[in-house]
Amino acid sequence: MFQGSMVALVSPMNADGSLDIKGYNDLLDFHVQNKSDGVVVVGTTGEAPTIDFDEHISLIKEAVNFIRGRMPVIAGTGANSTKEAIFLTQEAKNAGVDGSLLVTPYYNKPTQKGLYEHYKAINDAVSIPQILYNVPARTCCDLENDTVIKLSQLPNIVGIKDATGDLTRIDNLKNKVSDDFTFISGDDLTFLDYLKMGGDGVISVTANVRPHLMHEIYSLVKENKIQDAEKLNQKLELLHKAMFIESNPIPVKWMLTKMGLIKQYIRLPLVELDPINAKTLNEGFALSE
């Protein structure tokens, strides 16, 4: 179910800071039309840290109701509180999502045993496909391979989104988990190499603005047209980098505003893109055409 280019969707907002639901649905439709293979809502790129519980649940429900099965909907439901993560995951299940994405607890820096017990508690509480999400650059918490292997034996844990950029991890895990365990890249800069090593897909920031190209690269890899995939991805390399020239989702929201797809607003403590970085973003976008 979870494969291909899945977009880590932004959360559009109005000038007063409220959620722009029409803009949200327009974006969802944009990704259906441009062949995204799935959508992840209310994750890091969706500004989950500054979206409250009611808004969080509302965005999940809206995505499920609007997509109506046209592509998988994955809800970001992770938290640094196990109780909150269970609550959000249950609400996502109630809304009808296809799966949940569970970032490692951030800031409180649990041990590997604590991580195992955290994910096991969610697994035991909510029967829904659950994807582990390891992004230590943001969370200061690394989900080690040995812990992933143990967690993969739990019935509701179906895969991992690896945003470490460390390609040795998938190689070391592949033969130690079940054949149906899903490997998803969370790093646009290395996602093509990840796919070539047996990855099933990517949850992508770049796909917000170039969904058709990200989908095409995945399709070429699956057809074993590796050189064609590499050539196409070369067009995106500067854009991949530019998407992280400032903290995500600052650059991608700026670019989507420039494309006329969303209104210009991002919630504090994030602020609008520094004009000095606009040139790099514009160059990356132009080169990807």
Image (cartoon, rainbow, N blue to C red):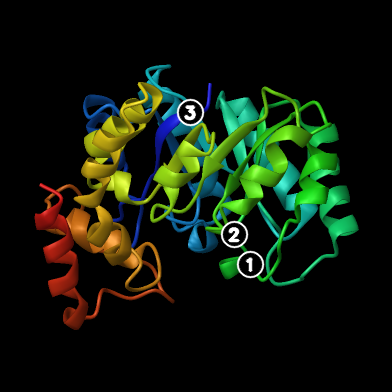
Q: Please name the residue shown 63% across and 67% down the image.
A: 139
Q: Position of residue 23 (x, y in %)?
A: 25, 43
Q: Is residue 163 left or right of residue 204?
A: right
Q: Secondary structure at mark 2?
A: loop
On the image, the x and y values in percent for residue 188 come to: 39, 52
> At x 68% / y 36%, what residue is drawn?
174
Q: Residue at 76% across / 71% down in the picture?
A: 108
- Nearest the viewer among 182 and 205 is 182
Q: Secondary structure at mark 3?
A: loop
Q: Amino acid at mark 1?
A: Thr
Q: Secondary structure at mark 1?
A: helix
Q: Residue furthest top?
A: 69
Residue 14 visible, this orientation:
no
The mark found on residue 139 in the picture is 1
Left or right: 2 in relation to 175: left
Mark 2 touches mark 1? (CB < 8 Å): yes
Task: State the separation of the CA atoms marked 2 and 1.
Answer: 6 Å
Give me the C-alpha separation between circle 3 and circle 1: 25 Å
Q: Which residue is mark 2?
A: 135
- The circle on residue 3 is 3
